[in-house]
């Protein structure tokens, strides 16, 4: 932390001293609003559709992928790049500007109707974030971390396609573009998770260091990137070009390789450490979600919605709450010990996953009820996070250091 001028740092409002602060808090609060509206919609209150850009299904998909998950990814990366490079991360007025662009887009898509203006506003904050991410990486020539920048640019392009769908300016479907976006996010989660979970587990359980096996790492990541390439290609190429059987094969092979990777991480040693078992559950849910998607695309044995939400709620959602709970403590100078109520939040989100997937698969007659219950459990989890972490994210570090 010697890279920063402490006196100048103290003049910055604490919430804008590093990107994780506004984006973790803003994304969490926004997801509570989004899920409460979603629950109200499925509970029969059709009037709330007026707050969903005129298209509830489109809005739910778009806002949970870009408005929520995108914000957390950007907040995490713009914070992590300072540790990677030793160069100061974006802060102060520049960070406030990016965050306000994100917030304006959320309000616009909540209260407005499809328009080019809101599309432009919503397409600005991610590429600006990509610039702030790429600059220190290029200066330090840390090329192994540069790939995160084109991933954010790619998400911006997919975001543009989402808006073109809302404006009726493309024949692409919400399902096809959302699936491609989920795959991009999944790759980011798997890469980041694969880097930090073994390290966190080793340090958190005080056991022997978890080593990397080169062929497992290379094979799992190669399969993941190939899967993403095929999914993206399917958006622009005719269906006759890509063999129909290729997608489930890649989904299954990716799941199997990541399971081999995951099996070495000593999951059972984490059962007494909520900050660890929550991460392990999320990674396992990513794997199960890909297996379920492979089953869906093979013979429709599992519904697309159930498989997708195992990946998004159980994998991405649970990974997010576990990561932001840990990162927020570490980057504010606090011990990595959570309050008991945060365990309730972790369990609530796991329950949200199981209700949205297992309950629907076993009791399809209760599908609408499951939508409502799952959304309420999600809102409960992130309400707890927001309340517990609000003072942590809006106040200066407890050790007096910058950040």
Image (cartoon, grey):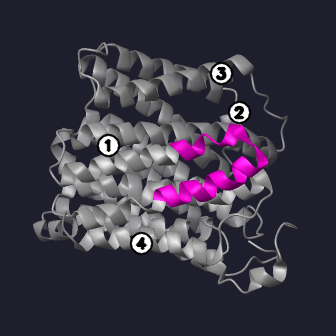
Per the image, the residue denoted by label 2 is 266
**Badge nearest the viewer, 2 or 1:** 1
Q: Residue 393 vs residue 288: left or right?
A: right
Q: Tell me which residue sits at (39%, 42%) in the image.
A: 181
Q: Residue 128 vs residue 84: left or right?
A: left
The mark nearer the N terminus, 3 or 1, is 1
Q: Position of residue 343 (x, y in %)?
A: 57, 60
The mark nearer the N terminus, 4 or 2, is 4
Per the image, the residue denoted by label 4 is 103
Residue in front for this viewpoint, 273 or 85: 85
Quick one: SS at disc 1? Answer: helix
Q: Position of residue 62 (x, y in %)?
A: 32, 53
Magenta span dominant secondary structure = helix
Q: CA distance from mark 2 to mark 1?
A: 33 Å
Vertical relation: 393 (above or below) 233? below
The residues colored magenta run 126-150
């Amino acid at each position: 932390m010697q890279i920063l001028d402490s006196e100048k740092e103290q003049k910055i409002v604490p919430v804008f001293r590093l990107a994780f602060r506004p984006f973790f808090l803003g994304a969490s609060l926004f997801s509570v609003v989004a899920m409460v509206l979603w629950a109200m919609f499925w509970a029969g209150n059709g009037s709330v559709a007026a707050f969903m850009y005129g298209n509830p299904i489109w809005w739910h998909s778009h806002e949970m992928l870009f408005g929520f998950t995108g914000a957390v990814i950007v907040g995490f990366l713009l914070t992590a790049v300072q540790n990677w490079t030793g160069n100061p991360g974006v802060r102060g007025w520049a960070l406030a500007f990016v965050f306000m662009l994100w917030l304006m887009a959320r309000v616009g898509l909540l209260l407005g109707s499809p328009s080019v203006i809101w599309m432009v506003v919503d397409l600005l904050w991610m590429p600006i974030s990509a610039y702030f991410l790429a600059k220190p990486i290029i200066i330090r020539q840390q090329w192994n971390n540069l790939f995160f920048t084109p991933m954010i640019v790619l998400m911006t392009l997919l975001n543009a396609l989402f808006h073109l769908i809302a404006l009726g300016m493309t024949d692409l479907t919400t399902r096809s573009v959302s699936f491609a976006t989920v795959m991009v996010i999944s790759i980011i989660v798997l890469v980041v998770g694969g880097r930090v979970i073994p390290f966190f587990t080793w340090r958190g359980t005080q056991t022997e260091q978890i080593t990397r096996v080169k062929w497992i790492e290379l094979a799992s990541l190669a399969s993941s990137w190939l899967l993403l390439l095929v999914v993206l290609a399917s958006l622009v190429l005719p269906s006759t070009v890509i063999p129909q059987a290729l997608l489930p094969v890649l989904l299954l092979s990716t799941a199997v390789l990541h399971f081999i990777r995951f099996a070495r991480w000593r999951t059972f040693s984490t059962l007494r450490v909520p900050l660890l078992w929550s991460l392990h559950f999320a990674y396992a849910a990513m794997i199960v979600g890909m297996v379920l998607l492979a089953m869906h695309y093979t013979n429709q044995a599992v519904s697309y919605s159930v498989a997708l939400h195992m990946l998004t709620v159980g994998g991405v959602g649970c990974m997010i709450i576990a990561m932001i709970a840990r990162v927020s403590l570490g980057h504010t100078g606090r011990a990595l010990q959570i309050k008991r109520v945060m365990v309730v939040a972790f369990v609530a989100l796991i329950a949200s996953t199981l209700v949205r997937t297992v309950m629907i698969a076993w009791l399809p007659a209760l599908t609408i009820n499951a939508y409502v219950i799952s959304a309420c459990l999600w809102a409960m989890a992130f309400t707890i996070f927001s309340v517990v972490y609000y003072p942590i994210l809006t106040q200066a570090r407890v050790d007096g250091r910058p950040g």
